[in-house]
Amino acid sequence: MVSTALVHEWLTPHATGGSELVVQEILKVVDADLYALIDFESSNPHSYLYGRTIGTTFLQRWPRAAQGVQKYLPLLPLAIEQLDLRDYDLILSSSHAVAKGVLTAPHQTHICYCHTPMRYAWDLTFDYLARSRAGRGAVGWVTKAILHYLRHWDVISANRVDYFLANSHHTARRIWRCYRREAEVLYPPVNVDRFAYNPQKQDFYLTVSRLVSYKKIPLLVRAFNQLELPLVVIGDGPELAEVQRLAGPQVQVLGAQPNGVVEQYMGQAKALLYGACEDFGITLLEAQAAGTPVIAYGGGGALETVRDLRQDPQGATGLLFPQQTERAVVEAVRYFEAQGSRISPEACRVQADRFRSQVFRQRYGDLVSKHIK
């Protein structure tokens, strides 16, 4: 029997995104011991990990770790390297920052499912520096030095991985750009059944997102102020106050909402708006699972999950706009207002079904088996 360890960055009640769903689905396929920088889920009665033994690092005991270890960013590489995994034959990692950097031995096989190379050290460096107080003045030079060090470590640690799996072709290209490593594409699981299919839509648009800079929510709000069409914004984050300040009379900012409320709005919306360049973008498929078309920026993973009305009229599930500008959003929404009825809710649901969790589990198991023979 192959002894297996699965390593993820952090496990907290606040981390409930696509990468955490990947961990949950991997554990349905592989019998593995679980490790992370920090774990506050095994003590959470509402978590599927409640009561599970999970290996952690010294950061587990540090102040306010449960609110996020990103504040200890320079120490994350050191921390992940302290996990002692010598007794395992197979190392699996689910990595969007440092999980792939665990130390391994020659007899071990390491397969990394990469959600993204560390975004704040690579693609989003200048965005992060421009918007953070830590990016200015003398402190800014220290931050730049830390990010420089993280890039070096990130490339070195990529050499500890035997096989990369990427969550999209876009991410596979980024892995090649950053690490010069090939990656097989395995789309992440989407909980399609969470969203009830609803062909009856109401007269409002929706965006559901963390309110952070690269998600471009202020851009969407300004565009809808011009359009004077109803937009509902669901989500929380550092840009909440700015979004609330920008919101015109037709824009409703709800902040963070329970899952049930999100599911209700997702099913009723005329279309989901999405302005970010994502590595994959599970929210785009969650909307389609509810039979809701998507109007999204035509970059990153959206190119692989949204079928554009202008390119594929028969199987269309949404519209892609070419630039992250107010003008591009306004033009796309106006086109949707005129032509959106040509997109069938059934086509949206069929597209989402291609990314079901069962598909991920089958392919992940097959790929792991292939690489450990």
Image (tube, rainbow, N blue to C red):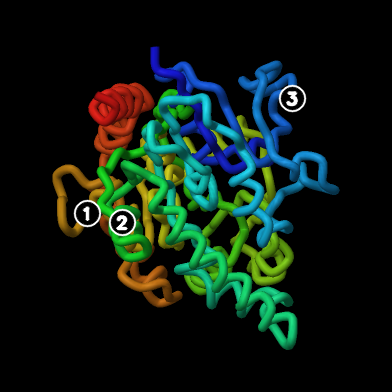
Q: Secondary structure at mark 2?
A: helix
As rendered, which of 327 and 95 lies closer to the eye? Answer: 95
- Residue shown at 68%/35% (left/top)? 56
Mark 2 vs mark 1, foreground winner is: 2
- Res 82 quadrant in image: top right
As shown in the figure, which amino acid type bears the numbered disc 3? Asn
Where residue 271 appears, x then y in whole percent? 41, 49
From the image, tell me which residue sits under label 2: 170
As shown in the figure, which amino acid type bears the numbered disc 1? Leu
Q: What's the mark number on residue 284?
A: none
Question: Quick one: label 2, few (<14), some, or many (20+) residues within 10 Å?
Answer: many
Q: What's the mark number on residue 309?
A: 1
Q: Secondary structure at mark 1?
A: loop
- Residue shown at 37%/64% (left/top)? 178
- Can you say which quadrant of the picture contains the C terminus? top left
Where residue 190 appears, x then y in whole percent? 41, 33
- Res 175 quadrant in image: bottom left
Q: Give the mark nearest the N terminus, 2 or 1.
A: 2
- Can you say which quadrant of the picture contains the N terminus? top left
- Residue shown at 54%/57% (left/top)? 230
For residue 20, side relative to residue 73 (left or right): left
Q: Secondary structure at mark 3?
A: loop
As rendered, which of 258 and 96 lies closer to the eye? Answer: 96
Q: Residue reaching furthest front?
A: 106
From the image, tell me which residue sits under label 3: 44
Q: What is the distance, in whole Å, between disc 2 and disc 1 at their CAs?
A: 21 Å
